[in-house]
Image (cartoon, rainbow, N blue to C red):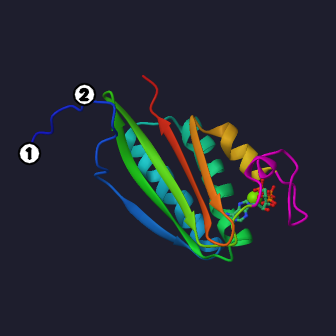
Amino acid sequence: MIKKPQLNNKPVKPDNSNLIPIANFENVILGRQRVREMMNSLGFSLLDQTRIVTAVSELARNIVVHAGGCGEMIISAIEKNNKKGIECIFKDQGKGIADVNMALQKGFSTSNSLGLGLSGAKNLCQEFEINSVVGKGTQVTIREWVKR
Ligand SMILES: Nc1ncnc2c1ncn2[C@@H]1O[C@H](COP(=O)(O)OP(=O)(O)OP(=O)(O)O)[C@@H](O)[C@H]1O
Ligand SMILES: [Mg+2]
């Protein structure tokens, strides 16, 4: 079957979805590997792969550390205006973040850590969205497009 190029602005339905439960640090490593594989097959440079995998690592790690490993990541190949990209959604049912802006400040940590994961991830990706509800959980979406 030949696919028509997408000319609208909406990302096409992901044709290559991948859901990885994130319960522990081994799952984080698997998530990193899957993202690298998909980015490689989409034509991202090694440098881009490493940059995004670093962000992925921090966001998945936060699910283990701050949400008790009660979450998952979903990796999808996306397309917009004939550009290929990757989208990673990090979803958890943890305690949520009371003040997202504060959590995004460099150096803010509730676990005596460096507090660089969230802000670092935001700076490393072309697109970054975060939603969190206290007592319900957190969802972070990142997107990266292959450079032409
Ligand atoms: N998924 C999450 N669920 C609940 N709280 C979170 C989540 N992710 C981040 N946070 C909150 O945001 C703060 C900042 O996150 P960030 O990743 O920047 O720092 P950290 O995880 O504490 O330290 P580092 O990542 O540098 O080791 C965390 O300390 C935590 O309070
Ligand atoms: Mg962190």
Q: Main secondary structure of the magenta part?
A: loop
Against 142, residue 146 (above or below) is above
Mark 2 — residue? 7
- Measured as percent of width and height from the top left, residue 16 is found at 32, 54
Q: Amino acid at mark 2?
A: Leu
CA gap, disc 1 to disc 2? 18 Å
Q: Taking 76 as reference, is 113 left or right?
A: right
35 falls in the magenta region: no
Residue 108 vs residue 30, the one in the foreground: 108
Instruction: Specify start and end residues of the magenta stretch as a single range.
Output: 98-115
Specify the quarter for ligand 1.
Answer: bottom right
Instruction: Report how many numbered discs are placed on residues in the image.
Output: 2
Left or right, residue 35 beside residue 7: right
Residue 1's disc is 1
Q: Does residue 114 show up magenta in the picture?
A: yes
- Which comes before the other along the chain, label 1 or label 2? 1
Residue drawn where x is 68% and y is 77% of the image: 68
